[in-house]
Amino acid sequence: MGLVRAAAPHPNPLTAVRGEGALALRKVASPMKFFADTADVKDIADLATLGLLDGVTTNPTLIAKSGRDFKEVIKEICGLVEGPVSAECASTDYDTMLAEGRKLAKIADNVCVKVPLTWDGLRVCKALSSDGTPVNVTLCFNANQALLAAKAGAAFISPFIGRLDDTGIDGMELIREIRQIYDNYYFDTEILAASIRSVNHVKDAALAGADVMTAPPNVIRDLVKHPLTDKGLVAFVADWAKTGQKI
Ligand code: E4P
């Protein structure tokens, strides 16, 4: 009599379905997420009222810009959004970075520890991810780096679109390459399009299949804008007034 194996449970439905079906399922299961790329709590609170904010990313530059105490501001942001709030380690060596990551993870349940794409950062990513702490691997500028981050168990990989564009390299092509590689191997790591500078970056990241985009608050606010929407609304309001009706 042959061995009868119980079907293994699949916490992630994507690992249960392969091929085109898996791709379709990923899209249905995970609509694109919007993160705010800022440490400004006023902006975050304001964007949160729109009901579209799924998380926040910060980095040392944004923390410096806020002029606030790092751990204090991260705690406050974590109370404003339910989703992941990326808090970046400041050190670059494995031991200190790991200790910093563990401290940051204790600030709130929704802290996501951010580490740079270096061997030390990847080792920290592996250690924290194995302990159940989500990690965002940042400063990603090529597809091999993204492959390493996925293998290290990263929850998010942050390819920097704008900074690549600044050097004359098409940043969005990197998103497309990572999407292909992650889909080839069913990696769970989410592609977090970072260093977004314009509304077109957001659209192109969505077309390229990024799981998440993080953008400065002004870019998120600009997403709704179109002159024909404004013009059309002025006309509708005026014509409605002519009817003398109320709803
Ligand atoms: C987010 O995680 C990144 O740190 C951020 O998007 C970098 O953006 P910048 O290139 O505009 O500084």
Image (cartoon, grey):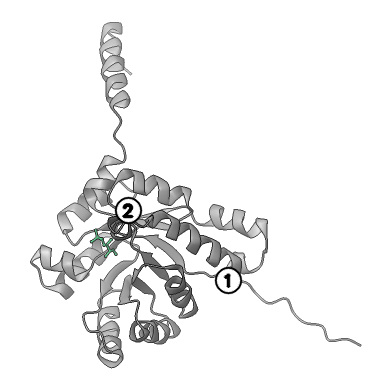
Q: Residues within 10 Å of mark 1 (few under 14, many from 20)?
A: few
Check the picture and name the quadrant holding the C terminus. Answer: top left
Residue 39: which disc?
none
Inter-mark Cα distance, 2 to 1: 25 Å
Residue 53: which disc?
2
Asked whether disc 2 touches disc 1, contact meaning CB atoms under 8 Å apart, the reply is: no
Q: Residues within 10 Å of mark 2 (few under 14, many from 20)?
A: many
Residue 125, horizontal then vertical, whole percent: 39, 81
Dividing the picture into quadrants, the one containing residue 221 is top left
**At 91% across and 88% down in the image, what residue appears?**
1
Q: Nearer the viewer, residue 22 or 141?
A: 141
Mark before the other along the chain sequence, 2 or 1 = 1
Residue 11: which disc?
1
Q: Nearer the viewer, residue 159 or 53?
A: 159
Q: Nearer the viewer, residue 83 or 90?
A: 90
Left or right of residue 128, residue 79 in this image: left
**At 32% across and 20% down in the image, what residue appears?**
232
